[in-house]
Image (cartoon, rainbow, N blue to C red):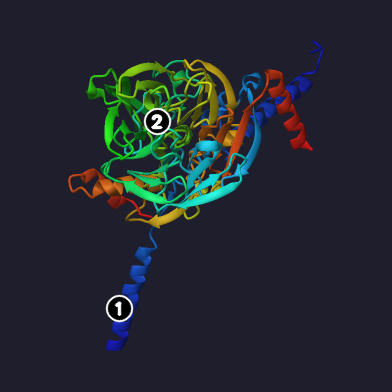
Amino acid sequence: MAGALVFGSLAGFLGGRKGKADENRWQLDPDKCMGCSNCATACVLDESAVKCLQCFDMCGYCDICTGYFDPNYNALTTAAENQMCPTGAIIRNFVEEKAGQRFYEYTIDEKTCIGCGKCVKGCALMNGSLYLQVMHDRCVNCNECAIAQSCPTQAFLRLPSEKPYLLKKLAQTLIVNKARDPKQTEARALINKVTRR
Amino acid sequence: MPTNASPAIVKLLIALAIALAIGVGAFALIRQNQPGGQTEAYKLDMGEQFRIEPQLIHYQQAEEFAANVTDPRVMTIGPDDRIYIAGYRAVQILDARGQPEKQLPLPGKAPTCIAVAGPDHKRPGGVYVGLQNKIRLFTADGQEAGEWADFGPKALFTSLAIAGDSIFAADAGNRIVLQLDPAGAVQHRIGDSRGGKNAPGFIIPSPYFDLVAGADGLVHVVNPGARRVETFASTGELETVWGRAGSNLEAFFGCCNPAHLARLPDGRFVTSEKGVPRVKIYNSEGKFESVVAGPEQLGVPLGALGDAREDTEHTVFDIATDSKGRVMALDPDRGSVRVFVEAKNDKKASDAGAEKEVNSSQ
């Protein structure tokens, strides 16, 4: 009787561990993403769970950001016709003027971003600091992710729920190096949220 | 419509029109929701940058030969028009016809730049290879001759050029050009905005920071974040500036270009851009003249522009010129050197292009 109880407890414990380990989440590998824009339309949610993120450590803070400006821009202004983003989700803020050049910070308005990846392609022409990720405050974690099904480069994969995000490999190298400094608390926090490769 | 048409026919036609409208609307909605059927607004259109008017292309590819080294990264031309290509763990030396001559071994770190000393240098024919923050030396006959490694952890050498006895090293990490003597000692720091020599300072958003040095004692340095080329005296005084930012052909594209710079024997400049790969010619005063090759001629398809994947991102062509005025482009994807020669006139260039099309379609 006691043996059966011990065996049952152990089986239950192991079963529970297995169940927890299986709680994986969908994510897309930014090094395999080609910015095809399927993420914007294939998600079962009306507003896609995929959003664009900015890796500031890779950004050049440039005046002519190819992720922000349409390649055929008329002027370097924030007028809608000059912007690449179809929903105007990139916010451009002046930072400083140095060596005769103006520098700007580009941030993503997550509520406005639809995850189409157009800016990711534009940014990839230069520094490649913009990338897409499945946001887990929105993703409903379908068994069969509709975006993963339609992804032309098979960029989707499953990650453990406690670390459900990925960085570009180059960004990971930069941020891991930065996080070695104990004062870099933001970098350390970010590294703790991502699955490292 | 006849005025005496029966009400039944009118009703039928209206019903058909409504059904047709619903059908068209439903089809449009379904198309929009299908992967690959998105609105044009989601697509990056680089068509205008991709296409180049054929009459502006004054060069044609004459030949192409294998780089003969894994992961070729940087290239230069040495004495007798020998071609030096640095790649994974080796420098490959080719003769002017592309025949392999010799390989020099390199340590594990990826080479970032290379230069070969001319006949007026203290070590004629000596090979200098930038390995991130170090410079490795070889003699003209390929023997290892030491390493300069005292430039600090932040240094990142992205270009070397040799004029006379001076070695100019573009350090992207510290945003400075160092003039070194034959022993590797720093003689001048060029482009330091704190130096009081009118230099505004270099802006280097990505690790592309190239320069060329001439026998006239001038150093032409790309300031990529400013999308221009700045000419300095060897002592650091800023002399002239040319180039402007823009997405049209005459200008330099994006945040930081040109990625590479070379000079023809007649003093004209050759530039190579990243993002939209194109090799262009500017006259000695920096006025746009013509195109050597655009993305199409370099074999980069329109769909590849902006492809964010790790293995397709950043196809950047290093360039070099030889004593005959040939322009060499190092193709990292094909692992080859592509040799472009100037066509005699525009008609010849366009004829050559047409002939190539015919050949490729056969």
Q: Name the residue carrying label 2.
A: B164
Nearer to us in this view, A19 or B263: B263
Q: Which residue: 45% across, 48% down? A: A28
Q: What residue occupies the far left of the structure in this picture?
A: A183
Going by the numbered disc 2, the residue's amino acid type is Gly
Going by the numbered disc 1, the residue's amino acid type is Ser
Q: Which residue: 29% across, 20% down? A: B199
Asked whether the beta carbons under mark 2 and mark 1 sit within 8 Å of each other, the answer is: no
Mark 1 nearby-residue class (10 Å; few <14, some 14–19, many ≥20) = few
User: Do marks 2 and 1 share a subunit?
Assistant: no
Q: Name the residue carrying label 1.
A: A9
Whether residue A104 is visible here, answered yes or no, is: yes
Residue A187 in the image: x percent, y percent?
26, 45
Q: Is residue B13 left or right of residue B160?
A: right
Quarter holding the N terminus of chain B is top right
Residue B44 in the image: x percent, y percent?
53, 30
Q: Which residue: 47% across, 23% down? A: B252
Residue B316 in the image: x percent, y percent?
50, 36
The numbered disc on residue A182 is: none
Mark 2, secondary structure of its residue:
loop
> What distance separates the C-alpha of mark 2 from that of mark 1?
82 Å
Residue A85 in the image: x percent, y percent?
45, 28
Nearer to us in this view, A147 or B236: B236
Against A168, is B24 above or below? above
Against B254, is B299 above or below? below
- Which chain does the residue under circle 1 lie in? A
